[in-house]
């Protein structure tokens, strides 16, 4: 994340998004407005920050969450008041407050701990809270999944432009590159960054849209969901197979082998699990991050055999890059384990320096950053926070339900969260969209799908043509489930 730089559009875009989101809430049903606002802001606002004294920096995440909550307080206050804290929210609460313990234990003071906890709460907790408010029901999750899919479609021309001309859109619009353009050069071409922090983040965004598009279409809910959104009628006039083919083709062209591996893995897990009615593959996905972290943390696995295999079968350049990450992880793990159970805290205290004070370490994976700054305690919480919705899916449902209209979006988002945790083993891409998935799934599977009745009641209170439209949307995208699946562990359906 960069400081205040670029042209006048940077503060104008960040600050101007607040009244725009408020206007959107007045024109569109609040749940749809929240999904559209968050996705568009994440896709197009600048990768920049405006420092605020005593508060977390003003970024595209903080401004979007704040604007949504302000708009909800102004025009949808009953929904805010309906929030109830549940047991599934405890891991997120502990994760948002763990920086305080890291600061206090390391003698950095309570003020530093509060500041770091506020930053973590705004980055992780606020998107989660927005999802608990607006996406904790079938209607909300179907809306969110559809908007993410449409966001992927919307990014197609921007990605194609940058593939041909190099990543320049952010510089043309906001006056600066958000990341080193050298890291976008791959295989004689360019990996687009568009308006996100890194090309790898864009690749994962396109993978998410593609998986949601394929799976929600298989669950036969996507066309109806698209039709219920503003301007969705125009999109529905385009043959859906053409839309999906364009999105998949662009995803394939992203020049990110890791993202493509995750895309194939995610769809493969969904199709094979529903076909075989087995959850084994999902459990294997969940086991990968802990197995990797333990093997790397204990030094049992150095990664050299994997680098050698990649050099032999694919690319020596990529193998060298991967081994460089492994070597840095080894240094950082040793430093992290020399610290406290709660990590080293902030101020680069978890990094490795030579005798002259030069930084020798490069931190890539989110897991190793977390282990260094927040210790084993924070790493366990990070893993639990991201993986909890997947555990709930396995506990509450059977694989045969994952291809139905009730659980099409839920199952796809759950698998995406498992893939996101795997992606963060080598990358440190903090993406709040996944916390929207997280909060929505946790709220839905903890309280049951019957929560849609409450949503319908709040919609009807709005009255008029808008209420009629929203009720058609809910009826088209939410179908009742047997009560036993809401209150009992997974059955044999």
Image (cartoon, grey):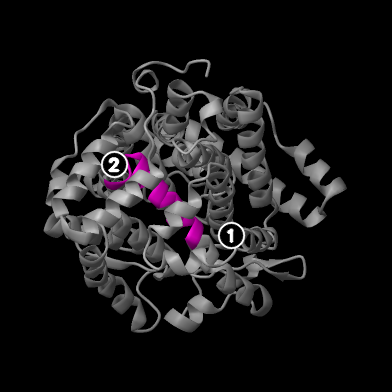
Residue position for label 1: 240
Image location (x, y in percent) of residue 467: 22, 54
Residue 143 colored in magenta in the image: yes
Q: Pointer 2: what residue?
A: 132
Q: Which residue is drawn at 57% across and 39% down?
A: 422
Closer to the camera: disc 2 or disc 1? 1
Image: 259 above or below 305: below
Q: Hey, which quadrant is residue 215 in on the image?
A: top right
Q: Would you call the spot at circle 2 few (<14 residues within 10 Å), some (14-19), or many (20 or more)?
A: many
Q: In which quarter of the image is residue 137?
A: top left
Residue at horizontal 51 percent and vertical 35 percent from the top = 404
Magenta segment, principal secondary structure?
A: helix
Question: Residue 131: where, in percent of width, then height?
Answer: 32, 45
Residue sitting nearer the eye, 206 or 288:
206
Residue span colored magenta:
134-150
Q: Position of residue 66 (x, y in %)?
A: 23, 58
Q: Is residue 424 visible?
A: no
Q: Say left or right for 58 vs 324.
A: left
Q: In this view, does 69 lie to the left or right of 344?
A: left
Mark 2 and mark 1: Cα distance apart in space: 30 Å
Residue 126: say if magenta. no
Count residues near mark 1 (Cα–Cα under 10 Å), then give few for <14, some for 14-19, many for 20+: some
Instruction: Say which element carries label 1.
Output: helix
Which of marks 1 and 2 precedes in the sequence?
2
The quarter in which the N terminus is drawn is bottom left
Label 2 residue SS: helix
């Amino acid at each position: 994340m960069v400081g205040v730089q670029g042209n006048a559009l940077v503060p104008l875009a960040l600050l101007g998004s607040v009244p725009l989101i408020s206007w959107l809430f007045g024109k569109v049903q609040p749940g749809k407005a929240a999904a559209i606002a968050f996705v568009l802001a994440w896709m197009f606002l600048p990768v920049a920050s405006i420092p605020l004294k005593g508060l977390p920096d003003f970024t595209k995440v903080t401004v979007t969450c704040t604007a949504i909550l302000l708009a909800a307080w102004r025009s949808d206050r009953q929904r805010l008041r309906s929030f109830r804290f549940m047991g599934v929210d405890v891991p997120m609460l502990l994760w948002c407050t763990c920086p305080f313990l890291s600061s206090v234990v390391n003698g950095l003071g309570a003020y530093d701990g509060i500041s770091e906890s506020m930053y973590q709460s705004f980055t992780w907790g606020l998107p989660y809270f927005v999802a608990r408010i607006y996406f904790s029901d079938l209607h909300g999750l179907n809306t969110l999944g559809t908007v993410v899919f449409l966001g992927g479609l919307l990014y197609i021309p921007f990605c194609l432009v940058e593939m041909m001309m190099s990543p320049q859109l952010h510089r043309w619009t906001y006056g600066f590159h958000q990341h080193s353009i050298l890291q976008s050069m791959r295989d004689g071409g360019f990996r687009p960054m568009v308006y996100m922090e890194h090309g790898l983040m864009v690749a994962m965004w396109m993978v998410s849209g593609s998986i949601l598009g394929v799976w929600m279409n298989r669950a036969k809910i996507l066309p109806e969901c698209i039709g219920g959104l503003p301007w969705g009628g125009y999109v529905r006039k385009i043959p859906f197979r053409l839309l999906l083919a364009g999105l998949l083709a662009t995803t394939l062209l992203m020049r990110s082998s890791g993202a493509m591996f995750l895309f194939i893995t995610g769809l493969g897990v969904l199709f094979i699990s529903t076909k075989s009615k087995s959850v084994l593959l999902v459990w294997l996905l969940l086991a990968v991050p802990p197995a990797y972290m333990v093997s790397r943390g204990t030094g049992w696995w150095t990664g050299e055999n994997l680098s050698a295999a990649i050099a032999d079968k694919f690319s020596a350049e990529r193998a060298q890059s991967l081994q460089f990450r492994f070597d840095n992880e080894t240094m950082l793990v040793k430093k992290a384990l020399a610290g406290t159970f709660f990590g080293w805290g902030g101020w680069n205290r978890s990094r490795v320096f030579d005798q002259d004070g030069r930084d020798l370490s490069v931190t890539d994976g989110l897991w190793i950053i977390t282990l260094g700054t927040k210790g084993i305690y924070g790493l366990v919480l990070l893993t639990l926070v991201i993986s909890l919705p997947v555990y709930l899916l396995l506990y509450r449902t059977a694989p045969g339900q994952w291809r139905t209209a009730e659980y099409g979006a839920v199952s796809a988002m759950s698998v995406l969260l498992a893939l996101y945790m795997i992606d963060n083993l080598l990358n440190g891409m903090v993406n709040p969209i996944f916390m929207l998935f997280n909060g929505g799934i946790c709220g839905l599977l903890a309280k049951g799908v019957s929560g849609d009745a409450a949503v319908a009641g709040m919609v009807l209170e709005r009255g008029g043509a808008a209420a009629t439209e929203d009720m058609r949307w809910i009826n088209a995208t939410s179908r009742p489930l047997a009560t036993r699946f809401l209150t009992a562990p997974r059955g044999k359906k």
